[in-house]
Amino acid sequence: MSFNTPKKIAAGVASSALLLFGTATAIASPIQQTQNGAQNAEPQANTHTVGDREIVARWMGEEESPYVKVANAQGAFAFNQEGVTPNDELFNIFGAALTSMCSKPAAELAEEQGGVANYYVNVGGNIKKNFTVNVEDLSDDVSDQAMMACSCATGSPFGQVAVMGVPLSAVVEMADLEDGVNTVTAYGADGFGQPLPLEYALEKNALLVYQVNGEELTTTGSGSSLQLFMPETVARYFTRSIVQIELTQEEQVPDVQQVDPTYRNKINIMNNADECLFKAGDEITFEGVADDLGSPITAIEFSFDNGATWTSCETDGATADKWVNWQFTTSFDETGDYRMTVRAKTADGVVSPLEATLTFEIA
């Protein structure tokens, strides 16, 4: 039995991030994984640490796998880099920690909390005269819009938002810098701040954001409504409720924290198969996101035979500042239990150290 309309696997909690999938599709092309160290051969095990535990992941051998295997699976593939994570969902994901956006970026978005928009920031450090700026006064002339993904150094990609803000460079240009200033630190009302190389922050076009997904930020405390957003940078630098910007000369320019190598090229499946009933011949649509925070995603790859073969779907034109929303639609003729494994590749040649998997049944 076949259907004209593909059946989606049940959406997970974060599926609302995939709101704007395009209609263009491409036929996936298979690639064969070889055993002699050729281009697409990958390690058979991966070790990483979570807390005080060491976890070793490996492929199950042929004799261990209970799943139906499909080599070089064919299907229709689509992707885009649009789609946003709703503000209320961001709040639920980040929980109740107190410091950076990585912990709780959206508390100021809750309308029921009240609060007044406040865009005043003090600027000091190694400058010839300290001053206070109302970023709102700059917004009409120099505001930028951007779509930005947010991800911690360890863990899955968890948010992408449309932001409006004033470039940090506009505030820096107002300061009369002393010689040798090389560091910028944005401090929140709670005292949290992470130093950044000034050159890096300017090159990445850091934004002092006052609007997220079309909602103006307000404040519930003594801080401002501004949040620092940094493209292609881990979320510990996404400071909220900014009250002070320090421009300083440091003996050593601070390092920028990078994504833990185990969590490079993150891939997520954004749906589940719980209570889903699929029959042989049904078209099934899988969907998810991938991001790397620094190197563009160049392909999403799928395996339905325990990693023996991979179907590679190119993501031509994808950029590093936003995540990739992907969809893969295929069908299966044989009944039984299946497992899909998905990974991503980046422009600098990194293959997802931690693949994502999803099991489902064809009845």
Image (spheres, grey):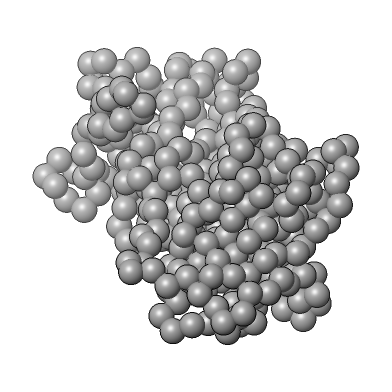
Look at the image and tell me in which quarter the C terminus lies. Answer: top right
Visible in this render: residue 211? no
Residue plotted at (85% across, 46% down): 115
In which quadrant of the rendered view does residue 224 lie?
Answer: bottom right
Instruction: Please indicate whether residue 43 sits to the left or right of residue 289 in the image.
Output: left
Q: Is residue 202 above or below residue 296?
A: below
Q: Which residue occupies the foreground of this view, 177 or 161?
A: 177
- Residue 59 in the image: state x and y as whole percent: 27, 27
Residue plotted at (22% across, 22% down): 61
Q: Is residue 241 above or below residue 73?
A: below
Visible in this render: residue 356? yes
Residue lying farthest to the left in this orientation? 36
Instruction: Please indicate whether residue 325 sits to the left or right of residue 233 in the image.
Output: right
- Residue 101 in the image: state x and y as whole percent: 60, 46
Residue plotted at (46% across, 63% down): 196
Look at the image and tell me in which quarter the N terminus lies. Answer: top right
Instruction: Please indicate whether residue 205 sits to the left or right of residue 70 in the image.
Output: right
Residue plotted at (32% across, 23% down): 52
Q: Which residue occupies the foreground of this view, 45 or 276?
A: 45
Instruction: Please indicate whether residue 264 sits to the left or right of residue 103 in the image.
Output: left
Residue lying farthest to the front in this orientation? 129
